[in-house]
Amino acid sequence: MTALAEAWAARTHRERVSLVVGTVLVLVILVYSLVWVPLQRERARLRVELPRLQADVAFMQSSLSQVRGLSGTNQSSAPNGRRLPLLSLIEQQAQSAGLADYIRQVSAGQKEGEASIRLGAVPFEAWIRWADGLEKQGVRLLSVTIARDPTPGLVDVRMTVSQEGAIDSAG
């Protein structure tokens, strides 16, 4: 440390001022380039990403409230006491709701009285109305997975349903 102090003392006043000013400038440039610029870039990225994330949250919250409304058990029965087979009922309700073209797959579920349904790029509001209509016909939603489609207002849906009373008879 004494060598550094001797070197500093050997400098003229003008050289010392130049060294201090140069050191301060180098420090300012380093702080600017290593701290300030990356922070500003991240801030700009977050400013762009925040509205998209807020829209995602709003979409999920509206979906959650609508799914919660659908998840309650529905005790109503089919008109005239007749009960259509589950796959026929799904097809009929999809036709009447105008959603038949959106159904990608309907298959019998793992248990008797269950069905798995996959819809692609379906309008969310139309799907909600259709699912509500199914519940009014005695179809219970067992599981629902909703994925946002790139087109606003459209979703991809995978759902498992059962006809009321079918689970009890299957044991």
Image (cartoon, grey):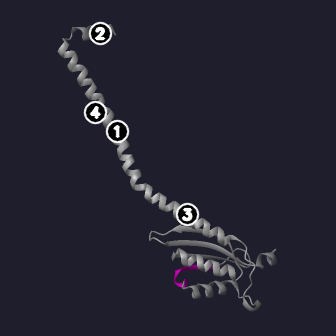
Three-letter amino acid code at disc 1?
Trp
Q: Secondary structure at mark 3?
A: helix
- Tags 3 and 2 in contact by the CB under 8 Å rule? no
Q: List x then y, in percent, for residue 45.
A: 38, 51
For label 2, the residue is: 5
Looking at this view, is 98 or 72 the one in front? Answer: 72
Q: Which mark is residue 60?
A: 3
Q: CA distance from mark 4 to mark 3?
A: 44 Å
Three-letter amino acid code at disc 3?
Met
Left or right: 67 with respect to 168?
A: left
Q: CA distance from mark 1 to mark 3?
A: 35 Å
Between discs 4 and 2, the one toward the N terminus: 2
Q: CA distance from mark 1 to mark 2?
A: 33 Å
Q: List x then y, in percent, for residue 81.
A: 77, 89
Q: Write the start and end of the magenta stretch as one range.
A: 99-106
Q: CA distance from mark 1 to mark 4?
A: 10 Å
For label 1, the residue is: 36
Q: Which mark is residue 29?
A: 4
